[in-house]
Image: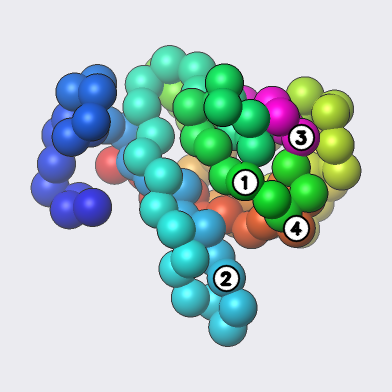
Amino acid sequence: MDPSWKCCPVCLAPLRGWLVRVGEEGRADGVYPVHEGKSFIGSGADSEIRVPGGGLARQHAYLSIGELCSVVDLGNGPPMTVNNIQTVKSVLIDGDIIRLGDMVFKVKLL
């Protein structure tokens, strides 16, 4: 996705950034657009950020973006870490690393 985009090309919602799934050797293994408001992260079809596999619950956590960006663990699976610290809720800044189950994501905010 082009960082100059202001709206999601699929739903036309205001784009606030991306979650970049980090794979082996630190390479990007997937990019998920992040919109204003609340977005659930999980393996289920009812999650806005759907990531199958990786030990994620159907709805594992959610991102909330307004003036601040935060992530909240819903307690449905393995514990969440942000920057290698186990937590249930954290305010995020650009470049933070989130681990959910076996998945690692880098936060890229506009």
Indicate which disc, 4 or 3, sits on the residue closer to the N terminus. 3
Indicate which disc, 1 or 3, sits on the residue closer to the N terminus. 1
**47 sits left or right of 3 in the view:** right
Helix, strand or loop under label 1: loop
Indicate which disc, 2 or 4, sits on the residue closer to the N terminus. 2
Helix, strand or loop under label 3: loop
Spatial CA span between label 1 and label 3 = 9 Å
Magenta part of the chain: 57-62
What amino acid is at disc 4? Asp
- Is 3 part of what is drawn in magenta? no
Spatial CA span between label 2 and label 4 = 10 Å
Residue 23 sits in quarter:
bottom right
Q: Which residue is mark 4?
A: 102
What amino acid is at disc 3? Ala
Q: Which residue is mark 3?
A: 57
Q: Nearer the viewer, residue 3 or 45?
A: 45
What amino acid is at disc 2? Gly
Give the numbered dot on residue 23: 2
Helix, strand or loop under label 2: loop
Q: Residue 34: x, y in percent?
A: 39, 34
Whether tag 4 and tag 3 are in contact, CB under 8 A, the answer is no
Q: Residue at x 77, y 24 (%)?
A: 74
Whether tag 2 and tag 4 are in contact, CB under 8 A, the answer is no
The image quadrant where one finds the C terminus is: top left
Q: Residue at x 85, y 27 (%)?
A: 75
52 relative to 71, above or below:
below
Q: Which residue is mark 1?
A: 52
Q: Residue 26: x, y in percent?
A: 54, 76
**64 sits left or right of 3 in the view:** right
Indicate which disc, 2 or 1, sits on the residue closer to the N terminus. 2
Q: Residue at x 74, y 42 (%)?
A: 56
